[in-house]
């Protein structure tokens, strides 16, 4: 009787080295892995827009990063005394709309700069489910 499933792992090229720049986005696992990489001296950045759990939201954020689509007033809303966006984690929320947009757009530029230099990207998904509200994921 065999109680293990053997999964062959094929190493990808190039391997992650100390010269690598690793960009991670997705679930909290992406943050934990990035923190562990940084602890051991690797250049790593994770979740610049907070924890994002589903593939649709990650894909939309990557498109925004690559195409440098700035966040506008149409992308934010006021709820519970905070300005928020359906596209980013609520931890980034702010009490001032102008400050919130400025922070999101500054983060967008910084992320694009890092993303362009990244040698490796890690995307982790927390769920395949998405919820919509008035057409927004």
Image: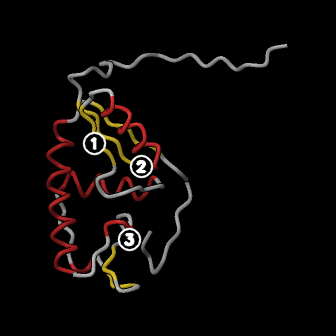
Answer left or right for 117 relative to 17.
left
- At x 47%, y 55%, the residue is 53
Provide the secondary structure element on which disc 3 rests: loop
Residue labelled with disc 2: 26
> What colour scheme does the image use?
secondary structure
Separation (CA) of disc 1 from disc 3: 22 Å
Front tag of 1 and 3: 1
Front tag of 1 and 2: 1
Q: Residue furthest top?
A: 1
- At x 36%, y 53%, the residue is 59
The foreground one among 17 and 5 is 17
Q: Are marks 3 and 2 in contact (CB under 8 Å)?
A: no
Q: Crowding near pointer 2: few (<14 within 10 Å), some, many (20+)?
A: many
Residue labelled with disc 3: 86
Residue 45: mark in rendering: 1
For marks 3 and 2 on the same chain, the one whose residue lies earlier in the sequence: 2
The foreground one among 128 and 99 is 99
Which of the 4 image quadrants contains residue 37? top left
């Amino acid at each position: 009787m065999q109680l293990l499933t053997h999964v062959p792992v094929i190493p990808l090229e190039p391997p992650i080295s100390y010269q690598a720049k690793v960009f991670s986005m997705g679930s909290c696992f992406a943050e934990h892995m990035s923190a562990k990489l940084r602890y051991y001296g690797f250049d790593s950045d994770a979740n610049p827009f907070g924890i994002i759990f589903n593939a649709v939201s990650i894909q939309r954020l990557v498109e925004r990063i690559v195409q440098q689509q700035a966040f506008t007033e149409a992308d934010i809303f006021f709820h519970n005394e905070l300005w928020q966006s359906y596209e980013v984690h609520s931890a980034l929320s702010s009490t001032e709309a102008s400050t919130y947009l400025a922070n999101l757009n500054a983060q967008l530029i910084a992320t694009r700069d890092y993303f362009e230099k990244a040698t490796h990207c890690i995307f982790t998904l927390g769920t395949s489910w998405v919820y919509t509200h008035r057409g927004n994921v």
